[in-house]
Amino acid sequence: MAFSAPIIFYGGLAILWGMNVTVEDPGSADPSDEELMLRYAAGEAAAFDRLYARHRGSLFRFIQRQCKERTQAEEIFQEVWMNLIKSRERYTVAARFRTYLYTLAHNRMIDHFRRRSSEPIRVDNDPEEGLDVIAGLPASRVDEPHVRVLSRQQGECLLRLLEGLPSAQREVFLLVEEGGLSLGEIAETTGVSFETVKSRLRYATARLRAGLQEVVA
């Protein structure tokens, strides 16, 4: 079932992306991602096509939100899929396919930023710093049931706020909202503790909510 200009919920913040998205029928008997990857590893090319169709949109947005230039995002996006293709024969179901895919993406992003000395990765020395101040702010109106959809302008504001987050916080936020990973899966993907992931997500969400308060007031 296809919808135009869908509502996307980012950490409880509803925005209108103005993009097309396909929502699969929950009652369908489609094979799991893990089954498709195993079938692809066994030589079924069509299984890869289905995996690519399922994950290309969210994976590209995850990468693009962390790159300033679309050409860089497109290059990294292609390299992630190429790495998956090259490693298909070694694939085992040790975790959800999403975790496997976004681990490949995370590692490729790390390599990308390491090569760009002018744009180093910023890591939170103290993820909790500033939370006491932010926590004291009034709750955003987007939490109210009757405030559901923000305008395209407000969505663009949210994207600018995302760009302003420290990279570690932004990545965790996008892994949740675009990748659909759990906090435990993100900890496994990024190689940090569960509590660190939890703190980064909490801090990122608080910053975004605070930044949007004037917009939704």
Image (cartoon, rainbow, N blue to C red):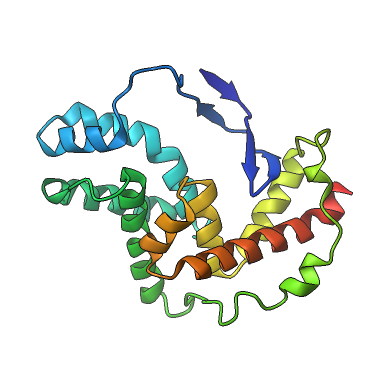
User: Position of 92 compared to 202: left or right?
Assistant: left
Residue 9: % across, % down: 64, 41
Residue drawn at x 55%, y 28% is: 20
| Residue 75 can be seen in this image | yes
| Up/down of 204 relative to 63, above or below | below
How many labels, in total? Answer: 0
Q: Residue furthest right?
A: 217
Residue at 10 percent of width and 35 percent of height? 42
| Residue 35 coordinates in the image, percent (x, y) | 23, 33
Horizontal and vertical percent for residue 210? 78, 60
For the point 36% across and 75% down, which residue is it? 115
Q: Position of residue 51 (x, y in %)?
A: 31, 34
What residue do we see at 76% from left, 39% from top? 150
Left or right position of 66 against 217: left
Along the viewing direction, whichever of 143 and 102 lies nearer the viewer = 143
Above or below 26: residue 139: below
Query: Left or right of 118: which side holds 202?
Result: right
Question: Could you tell me if residue 64 is visible in this image?
Answer: no
Q: Nearer the viewer, residue 125 or 50?
A: 125
